[in-house]
Image (spheres, coloured by chain):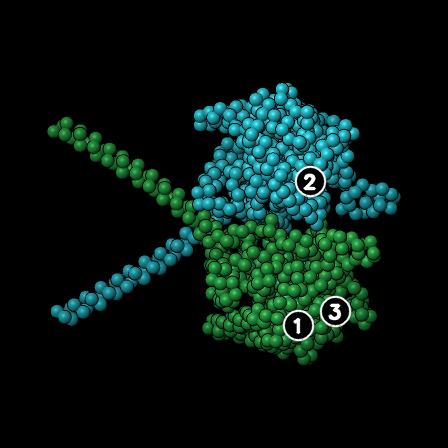
Chain colours: A green, B cyan
Amino acid sequence: MTPSVDLSICLLTLLIPLTLSGKVLVFPQDGSHWVNMKVLIEELHAHGHGVTVVRPADSWYIQEHSPYYTSLTIDIAAGADEAFFSSFVSRQLQIQREGSSVWTRLALDMELKEKFSEVHHKVCEMVAQMLGDPELVQALQDARYDLVLTDPANGGGVVLAHYLKLPLIFNVRWTVHGEGHFAIAPSPPSYVPFPVAKLTDQMTFVQRVRNFLMYGFRMFLYRRTVGPPYSALVNRYFGPDVDYFELFQAADIWLMRVDFVFEFPRPTMPNVVYMGGFQCKPAKPLPQDLEDFVQSSGEHGVIIMSLGTLVGQLPRDIADEIAVAFAQLPQKVIWRYPGDRPSALGNNTLLVKWLPQNDLLGHPKVKVFVSHGGTNGILEAIYHGVPIVGIPLIFDQADNLSKMQAKGVATVVDIASLDRGVFLQALQEVLHEPSYRENMQRLSRLHRDQPMKPLDRALFWIEFVMRHKGAAHLRTESYKMPWYTYHSVDVILFLLAVMTTFVATFVFGMKFLCTRICCRYKSKQD
Amino acid sequence: MTPSVDLSICLLTLLIPLTLSGKVLVFPQDGSHWVNMKVLIEELHAHGHGVTVVRPADSWYIQEHSPYYTSLTIDIAAGADEAFFSSFVSRQLQIQREGSSVWTRLALDMELKEKFSEVHHKVCEMVAQMLGDPELVQALQDARYDLVLTDPANGGGVVLAHYLKLPLIFNVRWTVHGEGHFAIAPSPPSYVPFPVAKLTDQMTFVQRVRNFLMYGFRMFLYRRTVGPPYSALVNRYFGPDVDYFELFQAADIWLMRVDFVFEFPRPTMPNVVYMGGFQCKPAKPLPQDLEDFVQSSGEHGVIIMSLGTLVGQLPRDIADEIAVAFAQLPQKVIWRYPGDRPSALGNNTLLVKWLPQNDLLGHPKVKVFVSHGGTNGILEAIYHGVPIVGIPLIFDQADNLSKMQAKGVATVVDIASLDRGVFLQALQEVLHEPSYRENMQRLSRLHRDQPMKPLDRALFWIEFVMRHKGAAHLRTESYKMPWYTYHSVDVILFLLAVMTTFVATFVFGMKFLCTRICCRYKSKQD
């Protein structure tokens, strides 16, 4: 599927349609997820495929003009509300530190759920607006796309693909129903920890009870709060016989942003393709001033810190405590922090608004990565073999970091109790206890030792779907069964009924026989 | 892991032990399974690895001298009893044709189970003999193997690997516990057909009941009849705390001789590597006389027929019926048949004792493959895109062919009712109904379109285990749980108990309260 270059190849291309470049319709998830989708889009472009990206008019992340794709801008305000999430993080931080009541926490949690619900409603509106525009629909049909590529953190792409009768590929870690696997693969709650529960694959009885309850409750919640707008949309366009969740589970290929050096091993399906770490790449040389700063660290090396894009300003006292702890170390520190300069910043600490994270992580002088525990950052740290001091803030971050802790490659600091002493101790432990680095370098070797690079594997399967119009032979149709059939509940009840009937007949028969014999015996005696 | 060639590479090899050639100890399954193991061994040899093969002194299949491996011959008579299986096939054939009583069939079935039980006892004796020889054990330890590669159709390699504390790789389709997946992956009986049940992944209620019962019964049977000798062996060498089935499930990598163009998609695990069709390769040119015969078929093409190595002589009347049917076709026929020449053989039919099956299947003139439905033959037919007329005889053959029938690439003829008319009709259907060939060619395209050749993938993972001393990060440890923990039965019972207590307390509380209120009301009225 590479672009044709000379005449002979051109002719060959005309003769064998299989080698033609493909056309991909992308329905992304706005916000930080876009970073992942962009990697795939750039690679599709490099392979000579044409990409069209559907975006809401107000999207800040998904830019209208790009050399890698054509935009299809829908005139609706449905972009990611970064201001909300940023303020949410600050408020959650405050609550954690002040030890607020359960009700305050619950109220904030509900607010987040409301926000997510609003996001899904907006996505549904956006799709409805597309499908309600006959000209646009005609144009989409005329464009003859090969497939729809979507991030199923929202369900818009699922509906669109079904409407246009196109194969469907997921670029997925989270779905509208929770972590990707839970939507299609068997997930025994006895050893598959439900995400965000901060559990491992080896649980005590109490932890298993908790995991079981969380599993049930979350599934219920997702189906109740997130499902309805999509079900309504599906009902409107495909009639009442089509089930939204079935369309969802019918995706041809699930490109899963998961790697088992990071996650715990668990059951999977033949149409799940693991591409965890697909965005990782070797480090490029640093800008000269940064390289000079790094080299000035001498044998002590460098610590880098970044808490992601959602955190702007940290509470001043926390920023100061962090700065003081850093100042006590012989290492040099590069700290990505867009907030006000902490007063107690040491001479060894360089404050920057942005840092080339991947290039720094790949630098041999870098000893520790202080991170909030976002998936991408963790996978980059694994790729380069740099151990972590984690300060989780929101979403899956605490869960991600607890996994890293279980694998002996990270320590985790609770921001609510963070002070210079606690933070310094965590840094020194990871700096001076060699097992952290050794374990991380072992994970790095395991992660890099794959038959194919994750990104190449992802591209292979996208092109596979183009060539074969799907991947039906890898996909079970078990999702079409009602749950009681899937779990053989009807069969078990039937067999129990048969057994009961059999036993009952036997017992009553024996009883009847005994009574008769007794009667005869009695009448004889009489 | 390729052999070093020049000095610089040699030096590099000394510096980086990761690139050294590995040493593999192979504990194979004697008999037809050896064909598959040999493919892997030859490839390991080609990659510069040293291979030692453990074999019983009387093995006819596993030869003592080979350019590809060193033999470790154990002085015991434990080789595959081909005479028994060959006679078994003949007797089963007779029973099928004569429509004998259920008891006769059951007796024959029991005889087969006895034979398998004997095979496993002999393997256990063989391993006990090895472990009881201190010099041999010392030599095995001194040899510093990187891993044990075994076909888990017997459990000898599992015990040996654990004794020598070596990583373990399976070359597997069948295990001592049934089809490979059933030993490690979740296998919902609602859509995963139990092998040899001739069911598909879409079952009626009655079929699901049958599948459920077969699943339970077979698992019970395997554990009762095959497990005990291995458990005794494990008990003797590792003490009563070690469970044989746990050792089995702890294998690092399962190289599964399965491909989903052949089998139905179903849940899997991260340490399962699919290498179905790893033995398939492009056709080589035919010997000149065979090529001339094939070319003489003109536009009609050629039919090839082979019923595998276990069938020597067919009953004379069946052979004659087949011959007569063939004689009525305009196609040429190449029939691999070691028995007496049928009297009614047509001029168009060439009888041979052996045929280059892969090279013939890859010849463009070959139109139909008449096969008994062995896995290897089916995968070769898929690879080359040749539709099948199946005549199943024994073991998994009927099940394999029923899958091919479900995918629209084969018709199946029951040997019990085979006559010239039935057979001719089956041949003509596959010859003249284009969908058979089209479907098979589609399967062929799907099968060949993989990111890596199955054999290369297998080698990659064997070398991965060499480099990392196992693949623990891909393997769940869920097999260490008792079944009621794995299936959360304890958690469910606990939650039910809590709920019951809660409801009971509530009901009794309400009752008590009502009684009190009633009493007061009554006493007031009084």
Q: Which mark is residue A61?
A: 1
Which residue in the rendered view is the most extreme toward the right?
Answer: B7
Q: Are marks 2 and 3 in contact (CB under 8 Å)?
A: no
Location of mark 2 (residue): B384
Give me the residue at 52% from left, 54% from top: A479
Residue A278 x, y percent position in the rendering: 69, 59
Which chain letter goes with mark 2? B
Give me the residue at 75% from left, 52% from top: A15
Please report whichever mark, 1 or 3, sits nearer to the chain's N-terminal start: 1
Residue A432 x, y percent position in the rendering: 70, 60
Mark 3 Cα-neighbour bin, 10 Å: few <14, some 14–19, many ≥20: few
Q: CA separation, marks 1 and 3?
A: 15 Å
Q: CA separation, marks 1 and 2?
A: 49 Å
Instruction: Please tell me whether mark 3 sits on a helix, a strand or a loop.
Output: loop
Name the residue nearer the viewer: A166 or B60: A166
Q: CA separation, marks 2 and 3?
A: 42 Å
Q: Mark 2 vs mark 3: give the one in front.
A: 2
